[in-house]
Amino acid sequence: IWMTLRFFAHASFQTRTDDGQSIVIDPWLDANPLSSVKSKDVSADYILLTHAHGDHCGDTLKIADKDTIVVAVSELAGYFKEAGCKTHAIQIGGAHNFSFGTVRVVKAEHGSMTPDGRYGGLAAGIIITINGYSIYHMGDTGLFGDLKLIGDMQNIDCLLVPIGGNYTMDPSDAAMACSWLKPRFAIPMHYNTFPVIKQDPALFANACKERGISVKIMQPGESISL
C-alpha cells in the first residue's frame, strides 16, 4: 500500500501517503448534497485545484490553514494568494516535485471563473505521481483528441473521470477517453450531484469493460488502498 484514496463526492477526493501527508483535490463538501464529510472534518497539507468553479474549489479557504499549499494554474493560484493562502502557481504542460511526489498539469476542455466572477485561468487536469504510482484527475472536461497523447506519454494507474454529461463527458465519451488513456482502472465522478448530470455509472462501467478497462464505482465517503 503506497497511499489511500478517499472519495468525498462529486469531484472531491483525498489521498493520504504512507508517511501521512494529506492531498485534497477539488474540495467542495459543505454545500455538496452527496457528501457526508464536511470541511471542518478535513485537513490538508496540499490542496490541488483543477479549475475555479465553486463545485471544485468551494471549500478551499475553509480547509486551508497557514501551512497548506494550494496548487493551481497561475490565475487561480493568484486568487487564493490574495485570499491569504500559501500557493504554488503552475501551468498547462508544467510539472513540479513536491514533498509527496510530482504534480503534472495537463489540458482540459472547460471554462473557469472564480466565485467573484474573475477569469480563473485555463481549466486543467492533474496527474499526481507518488512512489511511481499515478492518479490522473481529469477535472471537468469534454472529450478531446490530445487525450491520446497524454495516454502515450504517461502511464496512468488510476483515472478519475467525469461522466455526468451536460458540463462534461457522458458515460459513452468517458469510456472512449479511457480507451485512449489506458489506465489500470477508472473511477467515475462528477455525476448525480444535480438533476442535469444524473447518470447510471453502470453504463460507463459496461462501456469500459467492452474496451478492456476495469472500473471501480466508489460511493461517497468510501476509501480504497492503492
Image: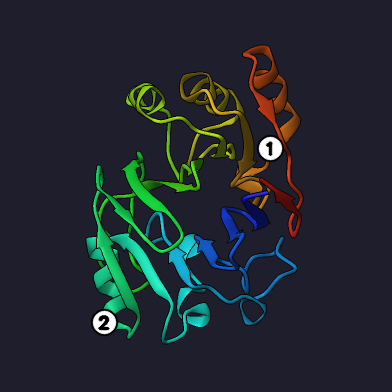
Image point 51% across, 82% down: which residue? 62
Above/below status of 31 relative to 217: below
Q: Which of labels 2 and 1 is toward the front?
A: 2
Number of other residues with Cα within 10 Å of mark 1, as a class: few under 14, some 14 to 19, many 20 or more = some
| Residue of label 1 | 199
Q: Secondary structure at mark 2?
A: helix
Say which label, 2 or 1, has the lower sequence index.
2
| Residue of label 2 | 82
Marker disc for residue 126: none
User: With 159 as the anchor, is 123 left or right in this view?
Assistant: left
| Amino acid, disc 1 | Gln
Looking at the picture, how far across and down is residue 176, in whole percent? 52, 20
- Asked whether residue 119 is in view, the answer is no
Looking at the picture, how far across and down is residue 122, in whole percent? 27, 50
Q: Secondary structure at mark 1?
A: loop
Q: Quadrant of residue 32?
A: bottom right
Image point 35% across, 81% down: which residue? 85
Looking at the picture, how far across and down is residue 10, in whole percent? 61, 54
Above/below status of 32 relative to 219: below
| Amino acid, disc 2 | Glu
Image point 72% across, 60% down: which residue? 34
Judge by depth and name the residue closer to the eye, 183 or 139: 183
Image point 30% across, 54% down: which residue? 96
Q: Distance from label 2 to label 1 (Cα)? A: 38 Å
Number of other residues with Cα within 10 Å of mark 2, as a class: few under 14, some 14 to 19, many 20 or more = few
